[in-house]
Amino acid sequence: MRRKSKAGHGVLIFTLIAALVAGCAGKGGDTAGSTNTPNPGSSTGESKAPAATLRILTENSPAWPVKKDWAVWKWIKEQTNITIQQETQTGPESMALAISSGDMPDLFSVFPADAQKYGPQGAFLDLSKHLDKMPNLKAFLAAKPEVAQRMTSPGGEMYHVLNDGAGSGNQVVWFYRDDIFKKHSLQEPKTWDEVYETAKKLKQLYPDSYPFVFRHGVGTLRSFGPAFGVYPGFFEDKATGKIKHGVTDPGFKKLIEYLNKLYKEGLIPPDWLSMDYKAWTQFIATGKSFMTIQFIGQIEIMNSQLQNGAHLKFMPPPLGYGDKAYIAKADYEEFGFAVSSKTKNLDAALRYLDFIYSKEGRDLLSWGKEGETYTIENGIRKFLPQFKEPNDLRKEMGILTAGAYGWADFEASMSLSNDNERYSFTEAAKYHFPVINALPPLTNEEKSAIAMTEEQVNKYYESSVAKFIMGETPMSQWDAFLAELNRLGSQKLIDAYQIGLDRLKRNIKK
């Protein structure tokens, strides 16, 4: 499931977190493979734990509209004796209104930014103070310190807990029309030089086409960047351990030069900057484009629409600059739970969170129950025939929807995938950039001090880069562009995030 947000820096570990989870065996990292027979999902009697009712505010995705009779809530009640009353957001203001209403739900589905905004204001509990009451969650965090890192504030508070396990669908990867390449004896391009040459050949074969297409405008550069050794924005450079502004790297300039050449020769659409999902789909579905970079799940979504032998396949990222081509490391989740500071059902809320991060909860809320969602054949679980794809499980049963899981077993979703889709996920994992495209957390004061500078730098970067790609500004002005970024305060941003990064490293050494 793809949800848009920013996550925290994923490669450092707070010593504080290690202290909080010390003494745990770390068994939370074990996986529940498809060959395991279930134990929690086969239970028919209700838990003897105290009965309770919890209200939870979640998103309402149009891809799987919320149903009150979803089976996941029944299964949760059987195991925990907790009745979940799901309330859904009606707009971007829903969370703020719920918090200010005086009648807050017990639990909220939140992004990290929500938690960092409302937690310090007193709306959400600091869950780091309650981990001893959640041994399963505590063990999970011991086994997943990178998740603990992303949900922890600079002072050590945990105003939310993050989902984990279903983030592989957030990866943005390359894919191509392998039927067209085979028809014309073309090879998968291994470098950006070959991307350019292959696109030119395809343009000659299909003059009304734009052989290479992408749909996130300047934002796509975050996905292109790792093949050139950088993220465009601010990130930790693994070679130095310092915050770096990727736009200043020679590799990023090389990327812009390639895109400028592709644009000038009509090898990417002229409206690449405003390309939306519908337009992108049309290019792919009508044979007007043959190479693309997009969310990994779109390979099979589009394959289900293509006809007459047309077919898409995962393509390894082509090398642009440096020693190795990467894709952005994005196989993590950006959504989770916060507990209301006003809840009158704290014990039940903590018990719910503890269950959904347990091995039993992971199994039940990823696979469902034998006879209701799957059968066991020769020791292997197989979903019932009515479930053709993972989204069927979400729509009909509520499996892996917002608020209904904590720690997912991705193998459950993969068991419904075809060979081509499995191949895509397996191959994508080989090309992850060493760090995620995110930054160390800052205090509210630190964020306020750089907010205006950050906005100015980002706006100038986006508009300038677009002009370079479209040739409105010649590449001879690149050094002037970098100088203006510095004048606007890019070094101030580097210094601010370096403070956050150094704070994390000091915590590690304690």
Image (cartoon, rainbow, N blue to C red):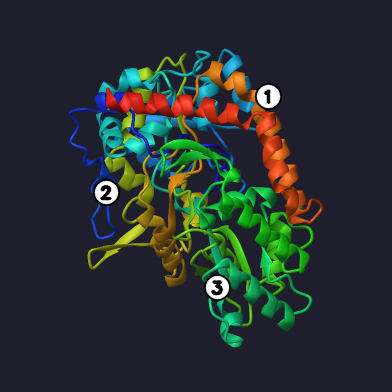
Foreground residue among 72 and 501? 501
**Picture coordinates of residue 394 (x, y %)?**
49, 50
**Mark 3 and mark 1: Cα distance apart in space:** 42 Å
Q: Looking at numbered disc 2 in the image, what kind of residue is underneath it?
A: Ser
Q: Is residue 464 above or below residue 115?
A: below
Residue count near mark 3 (Cα–Cα under 10 Å), binned few <14, some 14–19, many ≥20: some
**Picture coordinates of residue 344 (x, y %)?**
42, 14
Q: Which residue is mark 3?
A: 189
Instruction: Tell me: 4 left or right of 348.
Output: right
Which tag is nearer the camera, tag 2 or tag 3? Answer: 3
SS under mark 2? helix
* N-terminal label among 3 and 1: 3
Tell me the residue at 75%/73% (across/down): 209
- Contact between marks 2 and 3 (CB within 8 A): the answer is no
Foreground residue among 452 and 365? 452
Q: Looking at numbered disc 3 in the image, what kind of residue is underneath it?
A: Pro
Residue count near mark 2 (Cα–Cα under 10 Å), binned few <14, some 14–19, many ≥20: some
Residue 118 occupies quadrant: top right
Q: Which residue is mark 2?
A: 42
Q: Which residue is mark 1?
A: 452
Residue 195 occupies quadrant: bottom right
Foreground residue among 378 and 171? 171
Q: Looking at numbered disc 1 in the image, what kind of residue is underneath it?
A: Met
* N-terminal label among 2 and 3: 2
